[in-house]
Structures are given as structure tokens and as C-alpha cells.
């Protein structure tokens, strides 16, 4: 006896006894035995609401709506107990008894039953030396079916360490051993089921779904885990509503309106079967068909719900189910039930009358046939004769056997058991937690550290047949013990979806963004609602539903579809281009002309005009001019390290050589006329040797400048990405700008010096001034041709040969510089 729940009192015979306060809770079914097991079931699924005035003692709960499923669960427990009692291998010589209670699905009643199971209702004599110390009668409790009553019962019995094993309570909260230390179960936790449902929804690409849950611990906790996992997988809930079978009509209407107003076509239903029974009627009344339902194990494999769905609202549903099971002999035992064989107790009488729609004599009614107690169960078809819940019956069966194996170990059973050993709940609980055995049909039974079994599910698809009966087809498996990417395994079977469609339904807030676009969230909406924006130029996305566009490498550019980067066209002045070919031709023509002039000068080297122009410097000038013409070829073709270094330096050196020759020739002419003056001996200071040395000295200075430039920071090939978005301009970078300007500056200095000397030579005789008229004509022509070629020829080139560039866009845009 527990002192908080019982009081010690004296009877009329002055005998000290223990009594329970309040009205006793008597079991609906009971049987004596050496060891008593408790059972908690909801033989009734509801009760009549009463308005209490709190002025008198509340009346007992009046239960309604007989529940055939719970009778099946109770029969499964009795089958296991009877099988153990008849066994010579398990608990030999020990008989198991039971006390089964009906809590009607009520939390308050479940607490009262828990107290009754922990203490017993009998008046217990209390010896004076140890008053009220008798332990509770039952050594373990089987049940209950729903999570909320289990939480209430486990909270009460937890401090007493009384083992409680549920066959159908799946709330993940019950795995918390700090709150429910003595609770175990033979059905997996909803923690695994909720995550498995989210993976299933993700597998079919449903990212925009609605959700309905039972408004109790089972539905609320399960849906919370589903929502959390769904968010991690990129699934959004358009709505999530709670429903309970006792909800008033206005609340039910709000749920219907929510579904009607939604755009999602998939509904995840985390509901108990009792709630689905009521919800189907509401949905049928409003003709809400065409939705794809995803169900939890609470209802997805319940054939009674399928029979009730006459409007085919749930056709094509898919969800998770406890794996199919078979327990030999259980079907026959469950269906072999007689009210007269059950001590004619009240609950079985009510059950029999409901089962066969009849009344016994003592409670007969008009227009209703009389029950004989010998009715044939094979003549009816209802919830009790339906064996689709065999996996749950098996869970009850395994729970009873788990306790039996623990007791077998504690009592040291071999051929016989030590039936004099005092049992305590804590020892039984510890042994139950550690048990491992196989049932007669090969099922492994064991619990993890949270008191949960392995989490394995079958994936069930509702496939209607031609005769209107729904066939529960197993289309896959889910094993939570495997790696995450291998847990979900769908078979190669054709699935039937809502409206008997064979096409997977689409339920998304926004269509997938194709490659070449990126997702932009819609303001104020979930992450599954977005717009698809095309990637900008130079950016791509090559996967579906990309959240960003990746910028192409500088050498690549996006294609028209923006889903791939293509290599940019590399542009440079090539020999194959018309402009390159013309310039090459001009360069070679100039080289040839220079060569022809050199031949003419060589052929007529002894003539006065050649000799008067300092033939040696003239030939050196012609040679340098040849090099100048050939230098232009280094500016044509793909830039390389050597060509870039050669371009400016070779031109700078050869052009300085040209100017040095011109400078030398000019000095020679000036000196020659200065030497004709009386007393002048200036020519001896600027003879042939000095002329050669002056040319060499002027040229060597440029060579030194170029060597320093190439040593410190030489020109190098450069890929110019800035001028054009979709092209690469291959050009030469100067390296050191100082070196470049030093080369040009030195050329400019020599040019100024030439100009100064030419100014001094302006008054020389025309014969020695290089035929001045012809020179002026050639200068005018050269200037005219230079302006014509530099200004108008490029324009004519574009007009005639590159008409695609003759546009306003090309005129307004940047033009990449090309070096010639």
C-alpha cells in the first residue's frame, strides 16, 4: 500500500486495515494468477461531457462508442498470457493473471486506473509491525494505445518503477527517460516516423504541402518533428492545423475553409484513427477530393477507414506502416470469443450486443432480436473480424513476452521457478530493458537505451481495385538504422495517386528554376515561394533551383541560355585578317622598295649624287629603314614574350639607327660647307671614322636604354578583359612605362636635334639640299598620304569589309586599342 493513496483505519472489530480513498476502480476483465499483469485499453473511444457544479461529488465517467480495435488488442494480450501459461519452457509452474481496465480515452480516468494498478482496491490487513507496506499488485502494465494517456499513466507509475509497455503510443516525448523512466514500447518512436515522412515527401518533390494533426501529444509532437525535418529538407508548410474528434462544428469548418483556400495539393495527415473517422465525414460532406494524402501509421493501414471512405477521398494515399506480421494461432484466438466464456461480465455483454446488433433478455429492447450467446462470428463482417491490425496485435504479444522473459530470468527458472522470491518493480524494469529474444515466428525483440525498438516501416500505397475495395500495397521500406542516404528504399512498383492517376502529383509554390536562372524569394512568403530571375551577362547557373549565379572565369563568357561558360574569342591583329594582310604587304612592299633603292644606289654608287650623299651613311640608312619596315611585322600575330619584348625595343633601336644616319648625313653636309671657308679644318674632326662612331654612339645609348628596360620590367603578353565583355584582346603590356617613355624620349631628342641641324642647313645650295622641290613634293605627298591612310582608310575598311561594326552601338562603345 502506498501511504499517499491509502489511509489506515480501524474497522468495527478494531482491526487495522488499509483502504483506498474514494470510489474503487474495478477492472473490466480479470483473472487470478501467481503474477498479475495490468492492462490499460480504451474499450470505449469517447465519453459524455458533464457540467460539474462543484457542489457535490462528481459522478463516474459515462463511456460511449464501443471500440472493437481495443477489444482486439486486449484479446492479443490474453492470447499471449494463455500461451505462456501453457508453456513448459517459459515460466514453468508460474501462472500469469491479469487485470484489464477501460479508460475510454480519458486522461483523468487513466490517472485513476494507474493508481488502482499501483495499489489494488482490496481492503488489506496491515500487521502492526509493518503497516501499509504491501507493494502494488501488478508487476507490469500493458498499454495504452494512445500517447496522451500513456504520458499520464507513466508519470504516475514512474516513481514506483512499474514497467509499462505500450503497443501503439508513438510520441517521441515518451523516449525521455527523465520524465518517463519506466516506459517502454514495442512500436518505434515518432521521432523516426516524422523524419521518414519528411524524407518521403521530399523524394516525390513535394515542397509545398498542407498538414493536419491530431490535437494531442501524438499529433502535436509528431508534427513538430516533421516540420523541423521538412524545413531542413527545403519543404514548406502552407498551413498546419490541429483537429480532434470532439471539436465543435465551427472549428471543423475553419479547417475545411483552410484546405479549400490552399494552393498545395498534398496533405500530410499525422492523425489518430479515431480522428480520421470523424474527419472523413467532414471532407465527404464538402466533396474535398483530388488531394494527395500522406499518412502516419496511426491510420494508413487501417482497413476500417478505407471502408468508411465511400467518396474515395483517400484513394492513392501513401504513408508509413508497421511492417506486416504473423502470429500463429492469434487470429483464431481473437475470433473465438463468447460472452458466456467470459464470466458474463458487463463489458463483454455490451461488446457482444454491439457486435451482433442484438440484446440479451435482461436488457431486451423493441424491434431488436434477442442475443443467445451462441452467435456465429463468421456471419458478420465488422471491425472486430478485421485482422489488418495484426502488426499491432504482434506488438501487444511481444510486450507480454518481454515481461515474461524478464520474470523467467529473475526467478531463475529452469525446469521450475523460484515462486517464493519477492519481486520488486525496479528489478523487473531493469531486466525488461536488457532482454533480447526471438518470438516463435522469428521476430527479434529488444529495446534501446530509450526503451524503443528498432525503427522499421513499410511504405503503403492505397490502390483501389475494380470492386471498390482498397488494396494496401507495400511499395517500399524505410529503415532508420541505415545511413541517411539509404534509409528510404522504394520498390519498382507502379503507384496509384489521387484520382487514380499514375503521374506523380505536383505540389510546389513555385515551379523549379531552370538552369540559367536563380531563385529570388517573394517578399513575405516562405522560402519555397520565389521568382526565377535570369542570370546577368557573364554569370551562369547550371543546376535546377540555383540560389546564386556563378560568375564565369575572366577567360570565359556566359552563353545565350546562361547555363554554361564558353571560352571568349581571343582577338589580335593576325596575318589572316585583311588589315593584317594589308599591313604585312605594306611592310614587305616598303622592305622591297628599300632593297630596290639600295640596289640602285649600289649600282650607281660612283655617281655624283650617291657620292655627294655620303654613300656609306646612305647604305646604313637604307639598312636601318629595312629593319624599320620589318619591325612592323612584330606587331602582327599572337603576342608572345619574345614578340612583346622585340616590338618596341627593336623599333626603338632601328629607328634611332635611322635618325643617327640622318643626323650624321646632315652633320656631314654642314661640315662640308663649313670646311670650304678659308682657314677651316673642321672636316678632319668629322671624317668617316667619326661619322661611324657618332652613329654607333647614338645607337648604343638607345641599346643601353632598351637593355635596362628589358632587365628591370620588360613588356609581356596581356589578356585585356576590360575593353569587351565577350572578347579577350591579346596585347602587349609595356611593363615599365618609364622604360617605354625613355625610348620614345630619346627618339624625340634625336628628332629635335635633326630638326635643329636641318634648320641650320636651310640656306645650303639646293643641289646639296636633296633636290628641295622634289623633297617638298614628296613631303607634301607623304603628309597627304599619311593623313589619308591614318584617317580615312580605317573607316573605309570598316564600311567595306566590316559592316557589322558600322553601327551606333559600336560607335558609342569602347574600342579596344590595337597596336600596329
Image (cartoon, rainbow, N blue to C red):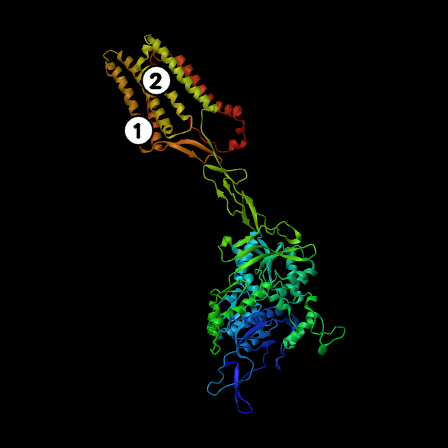
Q: Disc 1 to disc 2, how far (Cα)?
A: 22 Å
Q: Residue at x 48, y 88 (%)?
A: 128
Up the image or down, 59 lies above or below 533; here it is below
Image mark for residue 623: 2
Q: Position of residue 26 (x, y in %)?
A: 59, 78
Between 488 and 415, the residue placed more toward the observer is 415
Image mark for residue 707: 1
| Residue at the outermost bottom position | 13
In which quarter of the view is residue 609 placed? top left
Query: Quick check: 721 left or right of 303?
Result: left
Up the image or down, 450 lies above or below 48; here it is above
In which quarter of the view is residue 387 placed? bottom right
Image mark for residue 537: none
| Element class at badge 2 | helix
Q: Report if residue 79 is visible in the image.
A: yes
Q: Earlier in the sequence, mark 1 or mark 2?
A: 2
Q: Report if residue 525 is visible in the image.
A: no
Query: Quick check: 403 left or right of 361?
Result: left
Between 265 and 100, the residue placed more toward the observer is 100
Between 102 and 277, the residue placed more toward the observer is 102
Q: Position of residue 792 (x, y in %)?
A: 49, 23
Q: Position of residue 811 (x, y in %)?
A: 51, 31
| Element class at badge 1 | helix
Determine crowd level at label 1: few under 14, some 14-19, many 20+ residues with C-alpha closer than 10 A.
some
Q: Position of residue 377 (x, y in %)?
A: 68, 68
Q: Quadrant of the C terminus?
A: top left
Circle count: 2
Amino acid at each position: 500500500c502506498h501511504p499517499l493513496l491509502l489511509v489506515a483505519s480501524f474497522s468495527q472489530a478494531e482491526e487495522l486495515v488499509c483502504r483506498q480513498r474514494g470510489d474503487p476502480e474495478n477492472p473490466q476483465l480479470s483473472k487470478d494468477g501467481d503474477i498479475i499483469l495490468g492492462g490499460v485499453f480504451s474499450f470505449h473511444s469517447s465519453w459524455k461531457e458533464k457540467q460539474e457544479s462543484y457542489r457535490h461529488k462528481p459522478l463516474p465517467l459515462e463511456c460511449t462508442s464501443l471500440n472493437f480495435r481495443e477489444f482486439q488488442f486486449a484479446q492479443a494480450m490474453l492470447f499471449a498470457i494463455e500461451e505462456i501459461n501453457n508453456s513448459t519452457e517459459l515460466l514453468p509452474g508460474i501462472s500469469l493473471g491479469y487485470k484489464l481496465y477501460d479508460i475510454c480515452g480519458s486522461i483523468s480516468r487513466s490517472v485513476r486506473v494507474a493508481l488502482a494498478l499501483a495499489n489494488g482496491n482490496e481492503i488489506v490487513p496491515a500487521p502492526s509491525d509493518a503497516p501499509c507496506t504491501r507493494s502494488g499488485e501488478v508487476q507490469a502494465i500493458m498499454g495504452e494505445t494512445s500517447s496522451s494517456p500513456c504520458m499520464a499513466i507513466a508519470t504516475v507509475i514512474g516513481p514506483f518503477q512499474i514497467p509499462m509497455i505500450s503497443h501503439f503510443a508513438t510520441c517521441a516525448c515518451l523516449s525521455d527517460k527523465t520524465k518517463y523512466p519506466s516506459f517502454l514500447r514495442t512500436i518505434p518512436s515518432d521521432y523516426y516516423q516524422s523524419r521518414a515522412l519528411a524524407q518521403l515527401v521530399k523524394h516525390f518533390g513535394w515542397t509545398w504541402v498542407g498538414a493536419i494533426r491530431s490535437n494531442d501529444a501524438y499529433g502535436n509532437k509528431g508534427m513538430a518533428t516533421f516540420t523541423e525535418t521538412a524545413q531542413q529538407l527545403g519543404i514548406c508548410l502552407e498551413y498546419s492545423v490541429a483537429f480532434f474528434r470532439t471539436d465543435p462544428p465551427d472549428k471543423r469548418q475553419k479547417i475545411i475553409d483552410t484546405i479549400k483556400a490552399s494552393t498545395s495539393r498534398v496533405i500530410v495527415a499525422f492523425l489518430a484513427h479515431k480522428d480520421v473517422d470523424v474527419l472523413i465525414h467532414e471532407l465527404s460532406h464538402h466533396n474535398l477530393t483530388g488531394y494527395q494524402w500522406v499518412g502516419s501509421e496511426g491510420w494508413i493501414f487501417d482497413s476500417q477507414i478505407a471502408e468508411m471512405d465511400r467518396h474515395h477521398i483517400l484513394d492513392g494515399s501513401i504513408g508509413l506502416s508497421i511492417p506486416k506480421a504473423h502470429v500463429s494461432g492469434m487470429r483464431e484466438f481473437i475470433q473465438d470469443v463468447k460472452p458466456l466464456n467470459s464470466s458474463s461480465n458487463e463489458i463483454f455483454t455490451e461488446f457482444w450486443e454491439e457486435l451482433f446488433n442484438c440484446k440479451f433478455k435482461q436488457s431486451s429492447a423493441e424491434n431488436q432480436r434477442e442475443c443467445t450467446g451462441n452467435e456465429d462470428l463468421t456471419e458478420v463482417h465488422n471491425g472486430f473480424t478485421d485482422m489488418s491490425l495484426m502488426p499491432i496485435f504482434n506488438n501487444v504479444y511481444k510486450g507480454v513476452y518481454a515481461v515474461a522473459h524478464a520474470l523467467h530470468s529473475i526467478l531463475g527458472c529452469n525446469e521450475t521457478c523460484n515462486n517464493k522470491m519477492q519481486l520488486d518493480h525496479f528489478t523487473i524494469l531493469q531486466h525488461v530493458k536488457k532482454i533480447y529474444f526471438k518470438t516463435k515466428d522469428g521476430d527479434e525483440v529488444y529495446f534501446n537505451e530509450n526503451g524503443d525498438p528498432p525503427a522499421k516501416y513499410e511504405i503503403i500505397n492505397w490502390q483501389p481495385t475494380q470492386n471498390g475495395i482498397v488494396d494496401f500495397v507495400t511499395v517500399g521500406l524505410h529503415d532508420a538504422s541505415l545511413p541517411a542516404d539509404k534509409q528510404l528504399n522504394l520498390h519498382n512498383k507502379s503507384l496509384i495517386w489521387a484520382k487514380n492517376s499514375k503521374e506523380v502529383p505536383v505540389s510546389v509554390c513555385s515551379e523549379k528554376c531552370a538552369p540559367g536562372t536563380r531563385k529570388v524569394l517573394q517578399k513575405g512568403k516562405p522560402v519555397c515561394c520565389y521568382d526565377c530571375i535570369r542570370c546577368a551577362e557573364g554569370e551562369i547557373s547550371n543546376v535546377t533551383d540555383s540560389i546564386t549565379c556563378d560568375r564565369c572565369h575572366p577567360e570565359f563568357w556566359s552563353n545565350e541560355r546562361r547555363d554554361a561558360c564558353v571560352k571568349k574569342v581571343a582577338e589580335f591583329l593576325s596575318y589572316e585578317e585583311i588589315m593584317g594582310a594589308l599591313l604585312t604587304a605594306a611592310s614587305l612592299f616598303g622592305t622591297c622598295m628599300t632593297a630596290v633603292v639600295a640596289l640602285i644606289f649600289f649600282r650607281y654608287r660612283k655617281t655624283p649624287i650617291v657620292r655627294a650623299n655620303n654613300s656609306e651613311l646612305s647604305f646604313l640608312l637604307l639598312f636601318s629603314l629595312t629593319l624599320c619596315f620589318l619591325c612592323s611585322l612584330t606587331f602582327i600575330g599572337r603576342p608572345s614574350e619574345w614578340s612583346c619584348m622585340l616590338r618596341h625595343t627593336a623599333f626603338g633601336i632601328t629607328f634611332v639607327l635611322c635618325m643617327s644616319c640622318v643626323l650624321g648625313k646632315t652633320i656631314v653636309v654642314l661640315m662640308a660647307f663649313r670646311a670650304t671657308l678659308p682657314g677651316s679644318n673642321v672636316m678632319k674632326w668629322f671624317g668617316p671614322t667619326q661619322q661611324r662612331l657618332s652613329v654607333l654612339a647614338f645607337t648604343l645609348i638607345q641599346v643601353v636604354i632598351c637593355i635596362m628596360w628589358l632587365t628591370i620590367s620588360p613588356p609581356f603578353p596581356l589578356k585585356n578583359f576590360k575593353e569587351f565583355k565577350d572578347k579577350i584582346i591579346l596585347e602587349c603590356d609595356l611593363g615599365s612605362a618609364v622604360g617605354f617613355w625613355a625610348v620614345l624620349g630619346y627618339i624625340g631628342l634625336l628628332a629635335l636635334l635633326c630638326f635643329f641641324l636641318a634648320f641650320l642647313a636651310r640656306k645650303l645650295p639646293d643641289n646639296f639640299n636633296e633636290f628641295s622641290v622634289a623633297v617638298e613634293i614628296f613631303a607634301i605627298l607623304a603628309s597627304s598620304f599619311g593623313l589619308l591612310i591614318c584617317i580615312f582608310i580605317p573607316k573605309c575598311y570598316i564600311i567595306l569589309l566590316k559592316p557589322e561594326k558600322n553601327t551606333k552601338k559600336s560607335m558609342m562603345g569602347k574600342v579596344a586599342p590595337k597596336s600596329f
